[in-house]
């Protein structure tokens, strides 16, 4: 069945459970915005692209799904740059779509082009994956690769450029693949690593669980509660993991801001860290209360 590229992009994100689009419509994307609205998506168009980027980053945390944000060519993508950096440092899987001039216009020897700058070289250092849909038949592979990179390993943002010459181009495609048909889902540790961790936990006399915001974005709170109950230990929160897991309120303490948390860290002989980079707010797990 032949479908235009802008509809196929929405189809691919719908297969991931995405139904919210953030951004400000422009000629590159007005068709996509109208189609998303017709499908019943939530289409959020704030007054500034930076707000759209931050909203998409927050949505990825709240839903556990890729955030989707659109920036118009030139100043729109410049405005969104701060949100791209935020998604990078916060490990949030946000897909940023950037409009761009048709390549035939870009390559002409002319000056004074409206809203034109080479965007991909500017954005690429701040994302896990960057690509441009130059031909209609690249749509599936580029969208899939962007989502695969954004959601795999340590999550993070991806950037896809969308030149205007492919807006209405059509391609013949089958139904979109479900996520588990083209990327790794429900990632887990191998059996040897799990066995080693279990041995360390059994031998520990004063273990603690350190919980970061990755536990919440991966929706693994129930599994963490089960582990905490088995370990019968304190749960220490990082600054990014300060949402309580139901049923663990009586043993959950914020690191550094709670004397009980700091004492538990100082007296522990094993720390099981989940969903955290052990970054500067945690003193890298080496200094201050960890030093003892």
Image (cartoon, rainbow, N blue to C red):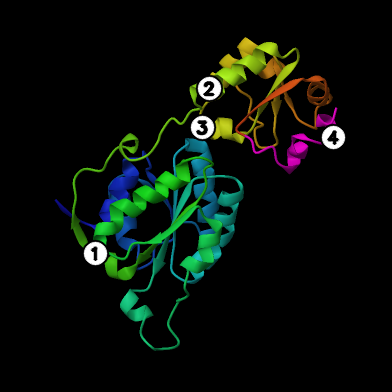
- Residue range (magenta): 276-292
Q: Earlier in the sequence, mark 3 or mark 1?
A: 1
Asked which secondary structure carries label 4, the reply is helix
Q: Label 3 near label 4: C-beta < 8 Å?
A: no
- Is the residue marked by circle 2 packed among few (<14), some (14-19), or many (20+) residues within 10 Å? few
Q: Earlier in the sequence, mark 3 or mark 2?
A: 2
**How many callouts does the rendering have?**
4
Q: Earlier in the sequence, mark 4 or mark 3?
A: 3
Given residues 174 and 201, the one toward you in this image is 201
Q: Which residue is mark 4?
A: 288
Callout in the foreground (2, 1) = 2
Residue sitting at x 28%, y 49%? 38
Left or right of 65? Residue 133 is left
The alpha-carbon separation of the residues under discs 4 and 3 comes to: 29 Å
Q: Earlier in the sequence, mark 2 or mark 4?
A: 2
Residue 126 x %, y %: 55, 58
Residue 221 x %, y %: 55, 24
The alpha-carbon separation of the residues under discs 3 and 2 comes to: 23 Å
Q: Which residue is mark 1?
A: 168
The alpha-carbon separation of the residues under discs 2 and 1 comes to: 51 Å
The alpha-carbon separation of the residues under discs 2 and 4 comes to: 32 Å
For residue 192, the mark is: 2
For residue 201, the mark is: none
């Amino acid at each position: 069945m032949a479908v235009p590229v802008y509809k196929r992009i929405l189809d691919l994100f719908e297969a991931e459970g995405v139904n919210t689009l953030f951004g400000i419509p422009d000629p590159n994307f007005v068709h996509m915005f109208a189609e998303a609205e017709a499908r019943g998506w939530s289409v959020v168009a704030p007054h500034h692209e930076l707000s759209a980027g931050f909203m998409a980053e927050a949505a990825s945390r709240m839903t556990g799904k890729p955030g989707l944000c659109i920036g118009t060519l030139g100043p729109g993508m410049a405005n969104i740059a701060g949100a791209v950096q935020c998604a990078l440092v916060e490990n949030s899987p946000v897909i940023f779509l950037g409009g761009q001039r048709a390549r035939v216009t870009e390559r002409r020897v002319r000056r004074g082009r409206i809203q034109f700058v080479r965007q991909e070289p500017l954005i690429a250092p701040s994302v896990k994956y960057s690509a441009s849909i130059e031909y209609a038949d690249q749509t599936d592979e580029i969208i899939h690769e962007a989502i695969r990179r954004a959601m795999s390993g340590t999550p993070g943002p991806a950037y896809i450029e969308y030149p205007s010459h492919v807006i209405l181009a059509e391609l013949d495609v089958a139904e979109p693949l479900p996520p588990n048909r083209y990327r790794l889902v429900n990632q887990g540790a191998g059996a040897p690593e799990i066995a080693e961790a279990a041995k360390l936990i059994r031998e520990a006399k004063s273990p603690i669980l350190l919980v970061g915001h990755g536990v919440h974005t991966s929706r693994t709170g129930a599994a963490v509660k089960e582990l905490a109950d088995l370990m019968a230990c304190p749960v220490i929160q990082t600054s990014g993991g300060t949402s309580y897991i139901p049923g663990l309120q009586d043993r959950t303490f914020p690191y550094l801001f709670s004397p009980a948390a700091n004492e538990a860290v100082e007296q522990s002989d094993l720390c099981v860290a989940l969903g955290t980079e052990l970054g500067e707010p945690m003193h890298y797990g080496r200094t201050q209360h960890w030093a003892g």
